[in-house]
Amino acid sequence: MPFFKQGAEAQSAQERFTRLLWWLATVEEPLIKDCVIDRNRYAIVGASVLGTWGFATLAWSFFFSTVTQVIPAILLGILMGLIVLGIDRALIKSIRNTNRNHILAILFRGSLAVMIGLFMAQPALLFLFDKEVRVQASIDNEYRKQKKRAELEKLFAPQKNALLVQQRQLLGELNLVYSEMSKARVDFIAETDGTGGSGKIGLKDIAEAKRAEYNVLTNRYTDLEKRSRPALITIEKSLSAIEAAMVKEQDAFALLLNTGFITRIEALSNLVQQNNAVAFRYYLLVGILLLIELMPLISKLMMPTGTYEVKARKVEEEEIRAID
């Protein structure tokens, strides 16, 4: 008796699962029960919808996990999976084997399925290429930092260049006077030790004149340095302030960099463009994942007209006549 009981329970579970597949395939259970051949056909359609539903739930859950916590991501993934399920069931329900010649309607439904499939393929591809995408995202973020630095340099260039020109002018004047002062000092010492132009040792008239010239240049340099020092200090502070502002902006920008969904998508795109091996597998996987989303629609379109379609059409016509 327990063996037969277990067998009955297994059969009951199988029947419930079959009814679930029929519901996914949008068939009416009272009509499909008497259609021996179509029962299996529509169960296959339901299985393809079930697979698409599961894939959509996983893909959307991974997508939301890039922007929120795990539990909310799972709940949102389930919600979006149900929405995709509703769309797929609507697409299947709207297609009948008796109206296959409605090309525009089929193209519209196919285009909708393609768009949904392409978007759902992105999270799946990010999951499959996760390590490679993270490496590329890190490289891309470093490039963004360099680009931001170049933009900051360009933004602050007018102020910085004006300060540098002023600094060069002041330092140039100081260096010029300092050079003249150094030369006068050398000439003065040369006259006192006999190595100068007069060849006489001691403070003679020429040496006295050289010393006077040296003293004048020394006083001039000291006065110029005293007058230039505040301006040079101000320029140094301004340049430091500009550099600090640039560093602050750079740090603030670095905090905005992340490895979110859009950043990973861009990294995946760059990875595909730069690596032919990745590009081949990328497009192959896109095709496979797109086919998963299109399978319910394809299976319904490929299905031949069966007894269920005939019965459903007749029941609908009778209901319409009954209303009239």
Image: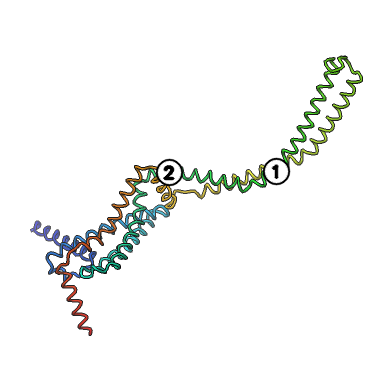
Residue at (36, 43) in percent of width and height? 276
On screen, residue 221 versus residue 51, left or right, reads right
Q: Is residue 261 visible?
A: yes
Query: In this image, 138 relative to 62: left or right?
Result: right
Name the residue carrying label 2: 136
Callout 2: 10 Å neighbours few (<14), some, many (20+)?
Answer: many
Residue depicted at 35% across the width and 49% down the height: 127
SS assignment at label 1: helix
With 178 as the anchor, is 321 left or right in this view? left
- Label 2 to label 1, Cα distance in Å? 39 Å
Q: How is the image coloured?
A: rainbow
User: Which quadrant does the C terminus fall into?
Assistant: bottom left
Residue placed most toward the observer, 107 or 223: 107
Q: Is residue 8 above or below residue 251?
A: below
- In this rendering, the answer to whether 123 lies above or below 102 is above
* Disc number placed over residue 163 in the picture, else none: 1
User: What amino acid type should be assigned to the residue bearing mark 2?
Assistant: Gln
